[in-house]
Amino acid sequence: MTRDWNALPSANSLWAATAEPAREFPVVSGEHQADVVIIGAGYTGLSAAHHIAKSGLSPIVLEANRPGWGASGRNGGVITAKFRLSFREIDAVHGRAMAQRMYGIAHESTDIVEELVSEFGITSAALTRTGQVKAAHNETTLKAAIDEANWMKREMGDAEVRILDKGQVRDETGSDIFVGGVLNPGSGGIHPLNYLRGLADGVARRGIPIFQESPVVRLRRDNSGIVAETPQGAVRAKQAIIATNSYSDLTGATTNMQRTLIPFRSAIIATDRLPRNLAGSLMPTGRTYTETKRMMRWFRMVDNRVIFGGRGAFGKQDSETAFDALRKAMVGIFPDLADVPLAYKWSGLVGMTLDSVPHIGRLDDRTLFSMGYNGAGVAMSSLMGRYLAAFVRGETPEVGLLDARRLKAIPFYPLREPAVRMVAGWYQFLDAIGQ
């Protein structure tokens, strides 16, 4: 596959506009040697490089564009200890021990973000751990959220989860449309691109080579290990890690991984800075928020701006229709924003899997991967870097349902986009009629 790498679109995002200056990295040229070559300089790849180097091994990171160009720089900056598959569903299908293990992994993921921010001194990441509120839009979804919260308290020992009434959610959000909700205190928010750039800078300062604009166009085995070839050079290593997630189709070297994912475009809008009195009345606690509709929307306040995001942007490029739908949904929740202009609109790809959880492990004796974060990747991808380092060392960490052997290819892969449109359209209809 031939691409003009300089022509790849950038995200017109709040994060890109407010991020610390990006460190420049060289383009790989000639031949290099490493213990591990890592394809992708997002959270997964950089965390893996950091933890591999701490093990005494030598990694090299190759990035097709620039660090943070993909999902790591385009997401909403929400940090949650959860999977798209609920712990209650895991318990029902896979048993209590598996639910407890997955609960432990989820909470480890939020903790590692805090550890990495502290270790590398990434103050510009503006990490908060103030919690997330799931705001219910009707009594049926409120009952389901309360039942789930009570189950988590009773069966998982989650003593921190709190049930909120309508008034408390109104005080939390500044909106009167919700009937109640649930607060999960361990969640938080972050400036995702500053976090990514802080990781990249910290990794580079510790002597780990990162090469940008160096797409791996071929990954081949040789007698001594594996070779990652780029248009300008190559890296010979004992092992390779694929950390490309929903952008795995950028080159033929990782296209096969793309067939295990359903790429779903997630759109985000951000308002102009709000007047002080209005900003003070919306989301005053600084938490992050989600609603309970099937086409889930989330929102948070950053720098006196409302950031509002959700699923529903189809195709390979930004969609004005999706942005318009987000604005309409935002004004439906916050009518006072009707006349506030939007300052930024952007989107990026979420990697969805058939079983709603990420996967990590070995493709073969020389190649590892981690991907499929299902829209909750800031924390989980950071943690997977630690687990990838363990696999590289020859260990077999207990990853529960994330085991690579559970990852399934998408059936009828060429039909994935029409199928996503059909399912999303059905969900939008159910949301519209209040179901």
Image (cartoon, rainbow, N blue to C red):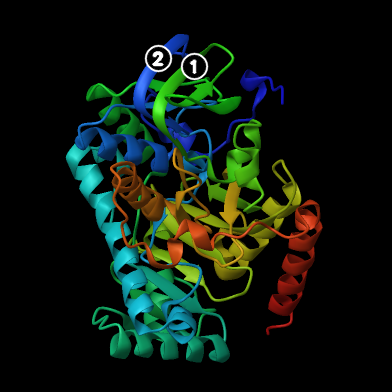
User: Residue 295 sits in which quadrant?
Assistant: bottom right
Q: Secondary structure at mark 2?
A: strand
Q: Secondary structure at mark 1?
A: strand
Q: Residue 11 appears at what percent x and percent y?
A: 58, 36
Q: Residue 122 appears at what percent x and percent y?
A: 25, 38
Which amino acid type is marked by label 1?
A: Ala
Which quadrant of the rendered structure holds the C terminus? bottom right
Task: Determine if residue 24 is in view.
Answer: no
Write down the residue under mark 2. 32
Mark 1 and mark 2 in contact? Answer it, CB < 8 Å.
yes
User: Residue 42 sits in which quadrant?
Assistant: top left
Q: Residue at point 71% right, 73% down?
A: 427
Q: Residue 49 appears at what percent x and percent y?
A: 32, 34
Q: Residue at point 32% right, 55% down?
A: 396
Compared to 388, does 110 lie above or below? below
Give the total number of marks visible in the rendering. Answer: 2
Q: Residue at point 29% right, 68% down?
A: 104
Which amino acid type is marked by label 2?
A: His
Q: Earlier in the sequence, mark 1 or mark 2?
A: 2
Compared to 136, does 14 lie above or below? above
Residue closer to the observer: 368 or 50: 368
- State the mark number for residue 59: none
Write down the residue under mark 1. 234
Which quadrant of the rendered structure holds the N terminus? top right
Rounded to the nearest angstrom, the CA distance separating label 1 from label 2 is 6 Å
Task: Determine if residue 396 is in view.
Answer: yes
Q: Residue 287 appears at what percent x and percent y?
A: 35, 63
Q: Residue at point 38% right, 37% down?
A: 196
Residue closer to the observer: 129 or 81: 81
Q: Residues within 10 Å of mark 2 (few under 14, many from 20)?
A: some
Compared to 72, does 432 lie above or below? below
User: Residue 312 sits in which quadrant?
Assistant: bottom right
